[in-house]
């Protein structure tokens, strides 16, 4: 199956390399963009199966700029292909149900494999999105230093807060309403006797709350 691919990156070297890789694998790079503001118009004229994008393009954040566009063109799967391996950004991509998040230090063949996995409907098992989904939804055991018990859901919320995710991101990640997230966040802050989300992240770091690590993957 030949895939229609759009690449978004402000590096000509990257887009050239991706074009060669896709053509060699029997797929077509139907277009390249070096800015994010033209994505909606491009996809309206050029439907594609996959969008491969750097996380930041011309100093613009992919998710901030294109969330509504990606929802509008939901038939196009997004793969983030980036030098940025910050766990917060991977967790945010996971919450938005991005197909995959591939560091540019990986081989280009790994990117091609991820593209082709879309046809099967199954992400590669070592996908950072798969790893992150498992981490965020896994019932981690609360640390012993947590003297005030949190419910399982509240502890999931704390783990999301420790990664710096917004209420909207948490809502998408856990498939619960925004109002429910807000209620849980307030309960967590009250039980931990802290005032804000930043304090929750600091508390998590100091008290052994599990965090994402990708240094052994790839």
Image (spheres, rainbow, N blue to C red):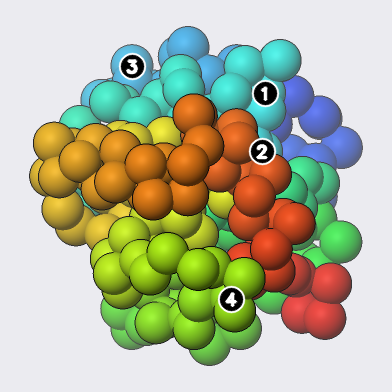
Sequence-earlier tag: 2 or 3:
3
Q: Is residue 104 left or right of residue 33?
A: right
Q: Nearer the viewer, mark 4 or mark 2?
A: 4
At 29% from the left and 46% from the top, the residue drawn is 187
Q: Nearer the viewer, mark 4 or mark 1?
A: 4
Residue at numbered disc 1: 57
- Which structural element holds mark 4? loop
- Which structural element holds mark 2? loop
Residue at numbered disc 3: 41
Residue 189 image point, x, y percent: 41, 41
Q: How far apart are the alpha carbons under marks 3 and 1?
A: 17 Å
Q: Nearer the viewer, residue 193 or 135?
A: 193
Q: In which quarter of the image is the C terminus?
A: bottom right
Badges 2 and 1: C-beta atoms under 8 Å apart?
Answer: yes
Please say whether residue 69 is visible from this viewpoint.
Answer: yes
Sequence-earlier tag: 4 or 1:
1
Residue at numbered disc 4: 143
């Amino acid at each position: 199956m030949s895939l229609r691919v759009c690449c978004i990156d402000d590096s000509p070297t990257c887009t050239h390399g991706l074009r060669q890789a896709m053509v060699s694998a029997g797929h077509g790079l139907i277009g390249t963009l070096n800015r994010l503001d033209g994505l909606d118009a491009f996809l309206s004229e050029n439907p594609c199966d996959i969008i491969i994008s750097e996380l930041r393009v011309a100093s613009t954040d992919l998710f901030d700029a294109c969330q509504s566009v990606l929802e509008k063109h939901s038939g196009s799967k997004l793969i983030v292909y980036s030098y940025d391996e910050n766990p917060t950004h991977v967790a945010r991509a996971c919450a938005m149900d991005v197909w995959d998040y591939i560091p540019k230090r990986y081989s280009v063949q790994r990117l091609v494999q991820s593209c082709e996995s879309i046809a099967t409907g199954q992400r590669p098992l070592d996908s950072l999105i798969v790893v992150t989904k498992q981490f965020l939804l896994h019932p981690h055991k609360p640390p012993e230093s947590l003297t005030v018990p949190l419910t399982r859901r509240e502890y999931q919320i704390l783990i999301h807060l420790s990664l710096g995710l917004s209420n909207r991101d948490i809502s998408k990640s856990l498939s619960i309403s925004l109002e429910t997230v807000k209620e849980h966040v307030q309960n967590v802050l009250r039980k931990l006797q802290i005032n804000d989300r930043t304090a929750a992240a600091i508390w998590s770091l100091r008290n052994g709350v599990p965090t994402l690590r990708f240094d052994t993957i790839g």
